[in-house]
Image (tube, grey):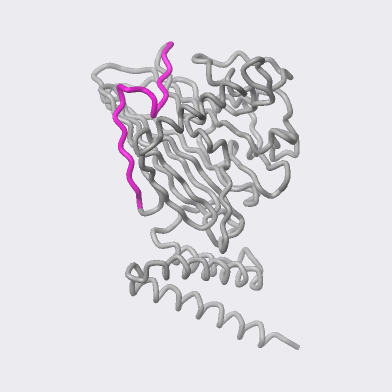
């Protein structure tokens, strides 16, 4: 843990004066460091008065990272000086591009809505790496997530109901998801899909963060080992999703897709990409009969109020399309109200 505190201190010293891109939709917010491209995903269950919780360690976003593996060398995107970084907002989230003489890595972060939610409750990370050199490259990818919410509880939970409280490897057949849940609120936590709707990892490791971070080639795990690495860290768990190397010819590309979001979503299987206008998402959700009419309307009203509050903060940004979408949502709810009244005995 001491090394973590030093890293956090150094991060804040280095971050003084640096700007960050904040993009927010529904229950999710993403903060991106515009110099490095390192980012944190935040979540809340209260849109009216959001108390944002980092879904993985947010004090130091450098501990969660994408690594590109070429031969016996590992490159951390956002750390390696041979890559130039560009950050920009997109209609549905954010886009980060890291460019070197040999590789161009583009990460699109797009808001998504689970099938049970009228608002954004997750993000899709889509990493595309292109070989722009004149020679073939064997490229592997590793995503290291510095989790923390479950460290005072079970550490991790799988969709099968199994809890993971010591070093573990998953390979071959995967559960739908793994989660890191808050010790004080069972519904608050990070959920990451591994079995459906994503690029299947070659292996998933649950282990001590420093052990995972220090490894360059495939991690040498020991089943059942605790999450300590004394004297550096105590009870410090993390996850590494490993995507084995593939041959990339000149001009060839490799894509890795990850879905993550709030544990309260229960699953992100079948999640849909957010629209450019969040009011349009609300209109589409109201047309989805998967929720009961009353549940839909209560959720829609909460969401509509939150969206109106956000728009009223800067009335100059309210468009004619926004007003039409608000009216369409209200018309749908009024029509459903009349339909329910007509069925009363």
Above or below for 274 versus 340: above
Q: Residue at x 60, y 22 (%)?
A: 2
Image coordinates of residue 62 in percent, x first then y, are: 47, 30
Residue 38, quarter of the rendered image: top left
Q: Is residue 35 left or right of residue 153?
A: left
Please name whichever residue, 234 or 304, is drawn nearer the observer in this view of the structure.
Answer: 234
Above or below for 286 versus 331: above
205 part of magenta stretch: no
Placement of the N terminus among the 4 image quadrants: top right
79 part of magenta stretch: yes
Image coordinates of residue 19 in percent, x first then y, are: 36, 42
Placement of the C terminus among the 4 image quadrants: bottom right
Q: Is residue 169 left or right of residue 253?
A: right
Image coordinates of residue 182 in percent, x first then y, are: 68, 42
Image coordinates of residue 110 in percent, x first then y, are: 44, 48
Residue 286, quarter of the rendered image: bottom right
Above or below for 74 versus 178: above
Q: Residue at x 61, y 56 (%)?
A: 45
- Number of callouts: 0
Q: From this viewpoint, which residue is outermost toward the left? A: 134
Q: Residue at x 58, y 59 (%)?
A: 117
Please name whichever residue, 314 or 199, is drawn nearer the observer in this view of the structure.
Answer: 314
Q: Is residue 9 left or right of residue 128?
A: right
Q: From this viewpoint, which residue is outermost toward the top? A: 72
Q: Which residues are magenta?
A: 72-90
Q: Residue at x 46, y 40 (%)?
A: 125
């Amino acid at each position: 843990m001491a090394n973590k505190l030093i890293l956090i201190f150094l991060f804040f010293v280095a971050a003084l004066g640096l700007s960050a891109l904040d993009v927010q939709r529904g229950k999710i917010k993403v903060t991106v460091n515009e110099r490095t491209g390192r980012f944190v995903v935040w979540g809340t269950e209260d849109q009216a008065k959001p108390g944002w919780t980092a879904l993985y360690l947010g004090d130091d976003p450098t501990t969660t990272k994408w690594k590109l593996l070429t031969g016996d060398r590992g490159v951390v995107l956002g750390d390696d000086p041979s890559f130039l970084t560009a950050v920009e907002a997109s209609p549905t989230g954010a886009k980060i591009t890291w460019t070197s003489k040999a590789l161009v890595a583009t990460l699109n972060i797009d808001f998504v809505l689970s099938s049970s939610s009228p608002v954004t409750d997750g993000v899709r990370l889509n990493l595309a790496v292109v070989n722009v050199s004149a020679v073939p490259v064997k490229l592997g990818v590793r995503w290291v997530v510095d989790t923390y919410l479950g460290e005072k509880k079970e550490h991790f939970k799988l969709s099968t109901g199994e809890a993971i409280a010591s070093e573990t490897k998953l390979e071959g057949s995967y559960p739908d998801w793994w989660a890191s849940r808050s010790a004080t609120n069972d519904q608050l936590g990070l959920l990451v899909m591994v079995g459906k709707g994503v690029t299947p990892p070659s292996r998933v490791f649950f282990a001590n963060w420093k052990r995972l971070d220090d490894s360059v080639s495939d991690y040498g795990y020991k089943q059942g080992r605790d999450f300590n690495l004394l004297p550096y860290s105590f009870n410090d768990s993390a996850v590494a999703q490993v995507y084995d190397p593939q041959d990339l010819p000149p001009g060839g590309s490799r894509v890795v897709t990850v879905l993550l979001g709030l544990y309260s979503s229960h699953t992100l299987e079948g999640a849909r990409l957010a629209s450019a206008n969040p009011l349009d998402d609300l209109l589409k959700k109201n047309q989805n009969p998967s929720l009961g009419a009353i549940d839909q309307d209560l959720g829609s009203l909460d969401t509509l109020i939150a969206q109106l509050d956000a728009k009223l903060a800067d009335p100059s940004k309210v468009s004619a399309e926004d007003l039409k979408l608000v009216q369409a949502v209200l018309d749908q709810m009024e029509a459903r109200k009349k339909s329910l009244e007509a069925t009363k005995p």
